[in-house]
Image: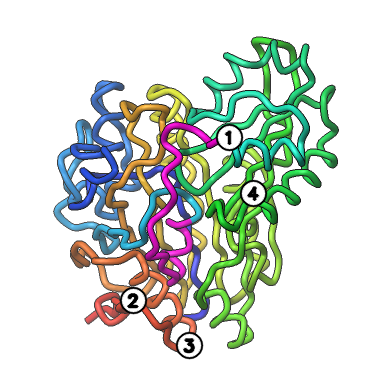
Amino acid sequence: MNRVILLVLEGFGIGALPDADGYADAGSNTLAHLAEEAGGVNLPTLESLGLGHLGGVRGLRMMAQPSGCFGRLAFQSKGCDSLLGNWELAGCLVTEQATDYSSGYPEKLQSELEQIFGKTLGNQVGFGPTVLRDLGKQHLSSKAPIVWTDGRRTCHVAAHETVLAADQLMRLCREARRALKEPWGILRVVAHPMTGQPGEWRHKPGRRDFAVEPPTPTMLDVLGRANQILIGVGKVGDLFSGRGFTRTLQPAPWTAAFDEVDGMLNRVPRGLIYAGLDVFDDEPAGSVASLHEFDRRLPHVLEQLRAGDLLVVTGDHGRHPAKKHRLPTREYVPLLVTGPKLAQGVNLGARSSAADLGQTVVEALLGEPLPVGESFLDALHAG
């Protein structure tokens, strides 16, 4: 193999993991629920890769002869979010239990935040669009940044451009990430610069995720030592604190990130193109429409693949719409793999850890083996 194109759709869940009950996620199935809400989905490209073999989803067909190999990835890390999901995909497991902030931040942690930001609003578990809608007017009048949590390891901070300039918000969030790691266990502080009028707020381009570095080696470290070209598109560069990447780009929205990947296929001859795509919307109808758009765009990428390419479509967690606060849900994610000269129609099964993907990518690109994960590269060889 010469090149791997890895497309990670944030929230692309396809059924509850065995331990989902411990996360209050029993019965979650993001894709099936979205399909029911929309009266079915129309995803012919993903169907052709084998998505229909991964469970009953309204409107999704099971193809007799898929052109790709298919399976599901589980997660072993203790937690459920984009950071831990992408880390495990890259071969890094986090096994210590996260601090529980399901009732919001304690007074001492709020005090830490206010030493950095001054007075803040929110300090609660929440879903970004809802929190911003509820507190937007108060934010503009008080000039206090809005803070919310996913209940676990991520702290979100939003400020309108008239309250904090984007560069100032970034500086303060970077400072907060350093301050909140110990003993609070916050691994990521997300800066959301905002613009627009009350009731019509919009995210400005330039969201940043300030994350700690992964605690163990990842496929990026290994492939960097193997002198591979490693390109990150979307927020994945931030999720790894930039470590290991040759170059990172953060276009927004997801369609712009997809276009970047599409254009790179003629410019990046080898290595790894790793893209995080925030395809799912705030509402089920928008999520399905975006997923249809992704499916419509994917054939142009597939047409450009050449011998020695391996393309993977997967996810980092679920986002079942019925989950309180729209938090990430503990789900399997699809594993769809294709490329010229590769096997077709192979059922890769339910992989016990998403780290199996990282190990496969490392083996495909001739890097040293990772400490965790079981490669499935042999199953992809035709014949």
Mark 1 vs mark 2, CA separation in Å: 40 Å
Q: Amino acid at mark 4?
A: Asp
Q: Nearer the viewer, mark 1 or mark 2?
A: 1
Answer few, some or many: residues within 10 Å of disc 3's Cα (few below 14, many 20 plus, some between 14 and 19).
some
Magenta stretch? 84-106
Mark 2 vs mark 3, CA separation in Å: 15 Å
Q: Are marks 4 and 1 in contact (CB under 8 Å)?
A: no
Which quadrant of the figure has residue 101?
top left
Residue 178 in percent (x, y) is at 69, 56
Mark 4 vs mark 1, CA separation in Å: 24 Å
Closer to the camera in the image, 92 or 57: 92
Q: Which residue is mark 2?
A: 373
Give the position of the C terminus as an image quadrant: bottom left
Q: Secondary structure at mark 2?
A: loop
Give the position of the N terminus as an image quadrant: bottom left
Q: Are marks 3 and 4 in contact (CB under 8 Å)?
A: no
Q: Which residue is mark 4?
A: 209
Q: Earlier in the sequence, mark 3 or mark 1?
A: 1
Q: Secondary structure at mark 1?
A: helix
Q: Which residue is mark 1?
A: 107
Mark 3 vs mark 4, CA separation in Å: 30 Å
Answer few, some or many: residues within 10 Å of disc 2's Cα (few below 14, many 20 plus, some between 14 and 19).
many
Q: Secondary structure at mark 4?
A: strand
